[in-house]
Image: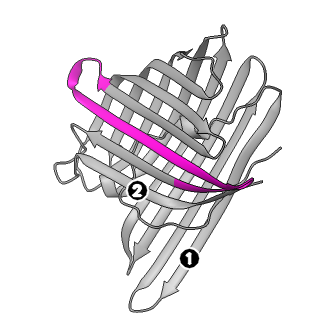
Amino acid sequence: MLRFFLALLLVTSFTHAQVINVETLRKPSDSTKWTGSVSLDISLIKNRNDIFRIANKAHVQYKDSMNLWLFVNDINLQKIEGNSLVNRGTQHLRYNRRLSQMVKWEAFVQAQYDAISDINLRALVGTGPRFKLSENDNYKFYLGTLVMYEHEKASDAVVNRLQEDIRGSAYLSFSLYPTKTLSIISTSYYQPRIDKFKDYRLSSNTSVLFKILDDLAFKTSFNYFFDAFPVTTEIPKTQYELTNGLLYSF
């Protein structure tokens, strides 16, 4: 059954972390199943300013007893008087192969751009094992230890900025369901350069959902991102995003 998610209310948001959190997009399934969601939002506002916004999100997953395929597309553009406040996009494809009850092997490719962070293209290719640390359905813990190749090209505003390196990507993820109406999902990433450990990125995403009705929940999400060496000194090392909203699924 396809699952479509509609955010009905956004209260607060700041700049977006540049590491996509795949854990919040995985859909549990014990049988062969396609799942996913697609959304497209376009806004044109005229008051004292001309405001334009377009956002497109698509998520498709296929899972059977041995394999999992996951594709994510996320594009967000916001302009006021022709000046971009947000202009970013990410495409992510991931494959999991089950090796045992507790171990899976992962491989992924990802491409993204972020004009506000002066990133014209950041391409990633990675692979590594994923470990299931708990078998309790109400308290799930996972550990991933991957290695990835990174190709990063700065935007035209930064001259001759091209970086290619190998990074580690370790993450710890947990999903907690202490009651029937409360869910807590969190993932934290640590991504250092293999040859230069002081060049690292930290990312954390935590979502708390309070179930209101069978298909309706109130959701609070906090994303945190730290880059020890951003593309330019003008880009802040720390970025974060706080979002509150209603989540409807069917």
Q: For mark 1, what is the residue?
A: 43
The answer to whether residue 118 of the structure is visible from this angle is no
Residue type, mark 2 in image:
Leu
9 and 74: which one is in front? 9
Q: Main secondary structure of the magenta part?
A: strand
186 and 119: which one is in front? 186
Q: Does 194 lie within the magenta span?
A: yes
Location of residue 123 in the rendering, given as x and y in whole percent from the top left corner: 44, 36
Q: Residue furthest left?
A: 233
- The quadrant of the picture occupied by the C terminus is bottom right
Location of residue 113 in the rendering, given as x and y in whole percent from the top left corner: 43, 49
In the displayed structure, does residue 60 sit left or right of residue 132? right
Instruction: From this view, report whether residue 13 is shown above or below residue 170.
Output: below
Q: For mark 2, what is the residue?
A: 242
Is disc 1 surrounded by few (<14), some (14 to 19) or many (20+) residues within 10 Å? few
Start and end of the magenta stretch?
192-219
Q: Residue furthest top?
A: 100
Is disc 2 surrounded by few (<14), some (14 to 19) or many (20+) residues within 10 Å? some
The answer to whether residue 201 of the structure is visible from this angle is yes
Secondary structure under tag 1 reads strand
